[in-house]
Amino acid sequence: MVPSRYVLLTAMPLTSTGKVDRHALPPPDQTRPDLDADYVAPRTRLESAIARVWREALGLDQVGVYDSFFDLGGHSLLAMEVVARLEETLGLRFHPRDLVRQTLGQLAASCEEGTASDGSAMPEGVVRKAWHKLGALGSRENGTPAFDG
């Protein structure tokens, strides 16, 4: 297991008994790690919704279209949580391995096309359900009208 983020300290904070005081450790930086791909903001409502779930799960301030979940510090247990949150909030149902094989933009595009990362068709109604939920999210959060279909 390799940490996704490091915090450099001049000295470890210690308790009065000489043990590491974990509560006194500073929180890790929430900036997006330096990756090969430059940051490109989400372009569609679906990309924005997926990015929001990834940001919350990873504790980052930015997640871009060309970012990979695992390159941003995700791991298999967190992937399961993200898959569950995407299904709960958007009705998107896919396999956790899709997070391994695709960037955020590719995942959103495959959801819009109704195909999984292996090229197989997604279950019927998943894309329609996702658009319906996105429309409902948009009307609640932004005051924008919901999608028609």
Image: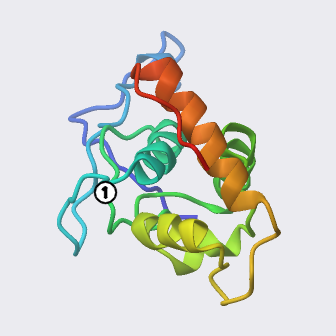
Q: How is the image coloured?
A: rainbow
Can residue 18 be seen in this snapshot? Answer: no
Residue extending furthest toward the bottom: 119
Q: Does residue 125 lie above or below 110 as drawn? A: above
Can residue 59 be seen in this snapshot? Answer: yes
Tell me how many marks there are. Answer: 1
What residue is drawn where x is 71% and y is 67%?
Answer: 96
Front one among 142 and 19: 142
Front one among 62 and 91: 91
Mark 1 burial class by Cα count in 10 Å: few <14, some 14-19, many 20+: many
What residue is drawn where x is 43% and y is 54%?
Answer: 47
- Determine which quarter of the picture holds residue 14: top left
- Determine which quarter of the picture holds residue 124: bottom right
In the image: residue 6, left or right of residue 107? left
Residue extending furthest toward the right: 123
Q: Which residue has dot 1 on it?
A: 64
Front one among 69 and 1: 69
Residue extending furthest toward the left: 38
Front one among 117 and 57: 117
What residue is drawn where x is 35% and y is 36%?
Answer: 28
What residue is drawn where x is 25% and y is 36%?
Answer: 9
In the image: residue 33, left or right of residue 19? left
Q: Does residue 117 lie above or below 95 as drawn? A: below
Residue extending furthest toward the front: 148
For label 1, the SS is: loop
In the image: residue 113, left or right of residue 30? right
Residue 67 placement (x, y as % from top left) = 36, 65
What amino acid is labelled 1 in the image? Gly
- Determine which quarter of the picture holds residue 31: top left
Residue 136 placement (x, y as % from top left) = 59, 30
Residue 137 placement (x, y as % from top left) = 55, 30
Residue 91 placement (x, y as % from top left) = 73, 48
